[in-house]
Image (tube, rainbow, N blue to C red):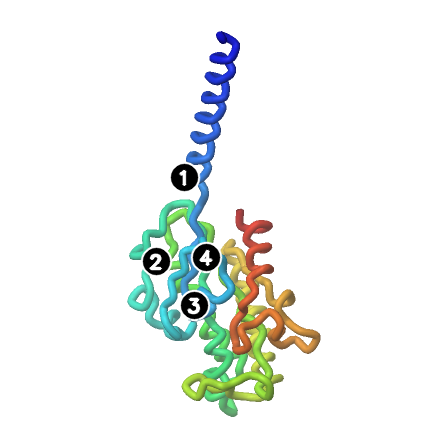
């Protein structure tokens, strides 16, 4: 009888210790937040705090900065992980129409990203966060993807792919410069021609199957 009581006490102690450890780990696990356009929620794990800001341009966020988004208003805490997700709409339907004889797509993208980084720095200063910038996902091919007339595909498929590749190249450089993490899963979601893999997409411009987003988070962020 005494032996049985002792065993029960030991079991209860083990359960109590396990519960304490569980809640301690839960309380000390950083929350992950995404901020941006529809790519801030497409394909992401539902456990992530997703802050969709509407069809926001990277250009607009960079210009308006804290007036457009101040992450301090979204319960972001010390030690959390923040992922900024913008640029796809710029590459899809804005960069092309601003190219002139004297202004190249590279000039336009350089300017957009310079302001984008300034806006991110203002949002994250003195917050002790792990800051990430999400790549622009692979572009689609116009012939096999329905087009939203409000956000049309401007430029040829190859031109838009060129914009996206350069956009990501500069984002990567800026991440290295500022000690940010470049959330790069581009190749995982590109088909053999460098466009968005239909099997992993929502049939439009978004990622649907988040398998490689989850892998990146587990391998790089946590």
For mark 4, give the secondary structure.
loop
Query: What's the CA distance linking mark 3 and mark 1?
Result: 32 Å
Query: Is residue 79 visible to the viewer in this orientation of the structure?
Result: yes
Query: What's the CA distance linking mark 1 and mark 4?
Result: 18 Å
Which circle's residue, 3 or 1, is located before the other in the chain?
1
Query: What's the CA distance linking mark 1 and mark 2?
Result: 21 Å
> Disc 2 or disc 3, which is closer to the eye?
2
Query: What's the CA distance linking mark 4 and mark 3?
Result: 26 Å
Q: Residue at x 56, y 75 (%)?
A: 164
Residue 100 at x, y percent in the picture: 49, 90
Q: From the viewer's perspective, is residue 112 above or below residue 70? A: below
Query: Residue 71 bears which disc, if any?
Result: 2
Q: Is residue 59 left or right of residue 139?
A: left
Residue 155 at x, y percent in the picture: 54, 88
For mark 3, give the secondary structure.
helix
Query: Residue 27 bears which disc, if any?
Result: 1
For label 1, the crowd category at 10 Å Cα-Cα, with few meaning under 14, some 14 to 19 and many 20 or more, is few
> Disc 1 or disc 2, which is closer to the eye?
1
């Amino acid at each position: 009888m005494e032996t049985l009581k002792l065993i029960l006490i030991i079991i209860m102690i083990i359960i109590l210790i396990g519960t304490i450890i569980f809640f301690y780990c839960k309380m000390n696990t950083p929350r992950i937040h995404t901020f941006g356009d529809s790519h801030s929620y497409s394909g992401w794990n539902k456990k992530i705090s997703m802050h969709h800001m509407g069809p926001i341009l990277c250009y607009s966020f960079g210009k308006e900065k804290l007036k457009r988004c101040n992450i301090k208003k979204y319960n972001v805490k010390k030690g959390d992980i923040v992922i900024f997700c913008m640029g796809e709409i710029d590459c899809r339907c804005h960069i092309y129409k601003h190219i002139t004889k004297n202004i190249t797509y590279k000039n336009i993208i350089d300017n957009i990203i310079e302001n984008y980084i300034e806006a991110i720095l203002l949002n994250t200063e003195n917050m002790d966060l792990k800051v990430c910038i999400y790549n622009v996902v692979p572009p689609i091919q116009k012939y096999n993807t329905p087009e939203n007339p409000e956000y049309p595909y401007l430029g040829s498929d190859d031109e838009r792919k060129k914009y996206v590749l350069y956009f990501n190249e500069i984002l990567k450089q800026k991440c290295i410069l500022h000690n940010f993490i470049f959330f790069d899963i581009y190749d995982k979601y590109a088909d053999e021609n460098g466009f968005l893999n239909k099997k992993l997409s929502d049939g439009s411009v978004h990622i649907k199957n988040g398998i490689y987003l989850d892998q990146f988070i587990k391998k790089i962020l946590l």
